[in-house]
Amino acid sequence: MEGAKRTKFMVFCNFNFHCIVFNIPPSILSSELNMHLPCSESEWNAKTASDWRELRQASRPEPMFHDSLSRMFSNKTNGGGYSSLGSYILVHALIQHIYLLRQLTRFKPESNGTLPSSEITALEQALKNWQCGWESNPESSLDPQDPHGPLAFNSTALLRMAYIRLSFDIGPGRALDTQDAVQIARAIRQSPPIQRSRKVTRAVLHAAHALSIPIKLGVSLVARNQLFMRSIQHSLCSLECAFLLSKWLDAVTIQPLDPPLSEDERKLLAFVTSLLNETEFAGPAATATRGFEEASKKLSASVVRVWAKLFKSDSGQSIWDIVDVIGRALDVYADMLDAGSQGDM
């Protein structure tokens, strides 16, 4: 029973990941899965029947998938009560929800490419509740080599992607289906400019924090050991973070700025600059004759180059072919941004 249930849920997640990667309609909808969420990884990996019974007696019954998904949208903080795989399934369901909302609102003239405020508020609450549930799960870990497996680690990449997609319609802006680095880079470069807002700033903050982790650990070390890029979820998340950060940096460094930078935007821009100053891609410093925004013109390309370097392992080849394609695409995109910034100067 548990094996069959896990198989069905993983098929749902895999089809949903195709939706995420290729921007195609999901083959299985969340509404079609009327099952209990999977048990904990400890129970699933129990070596003997007695070990399983002991773990089972100490655990709570698994909630229904639909009930858990519904509680995500509650204004009350959700305490979780689901396993690492349950968290992974639920964040997939939330991303699917965002995708379907995007499809419904894309061609409404009044939408201007954004989701209704009420939907954004509801989904932000759902993502917050999901995060609370993830944090309350004793099996959750940010270690990709955790004994319980990488599901909890991979789920955090999907959470960042959910926040990004909630604030920015990123799906059509890529060409991953081409498997061609130049076409992917060109599609990103030619995508519409980002519209600044408080919600976009919050999404960019998630992308900046994602960048801060490998920088603090050491970009070369992370790239050499492929700590993040072994995960296809984190690879795709890196592409979307690079996409969003570069587009936002273009938006906040263009002259003249209208409206001027908000306090939150200034702090975020300073944070990104400080991160880059810890890498080999640090940009020129501001001077009396070179203002802060002007000195930040090449930030966009520098950020993309940091992300691109994370895809370069010592072996020169990743486990997943698409990871190599994404890495090459980011290099090409950074070259395009550099060429553009030089043309502006």
Image: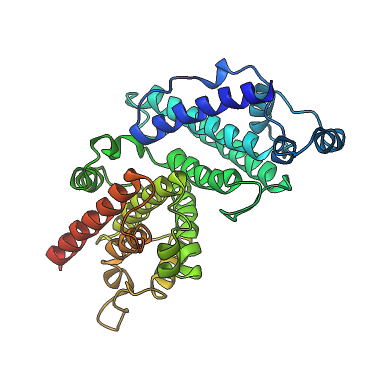
Q: Give me the residue at 48% from left, 58% from top.
A: 227
Task: Give the quadrant of the N terminus.
Answer: top right
Check the image and tell me how it is coloured. rainbow
User: Is residue 270 visible to the viewer in this orientation of the structure?
Assistant: no
Q: Quadrant of the C terminus?
A: bottom left
Q: How many marks?
A: 0
- At which x and y percent is residue 236? 40, 45
x and y percent of residue 36 in the render?
69, 23
- Residue drawn at x 25%, y 81% is 289
Camera-nearest residue between 304 and 291: 304
Give the vertical position of 327 relative to 267 (above or below).
above
Q: Of 320 and 51, which appears nearest the observer?
A: 51
- Residue found at the far front of this picture: 48
In the image, is 161 to the left or to the right of 283?
A: right
Can residue 135 be seen here? The reply is yes
Query: Which residue is at 40% across, 30% downward?
Result: 18
Vertical arrangement, residue 129 with respect to residue 334, above or below: above
Q: Is residue 305 above or below residue 158?
A: below
What percent of the width, then of the height, locates residue 331?
25, 57
Q: Position of residue 11 (x, y in %)?
A: 51, 25
Please state if 262 lies on the left or on the right of 60 as rendered: left
Where residue 125 sits, quadrant-wise, is top right
In the picture, residue 246 is in which quadrant? bottom left
Point 40% across, 69% down: residue = 220
- State the residue lying farthest toward the bottom: 288
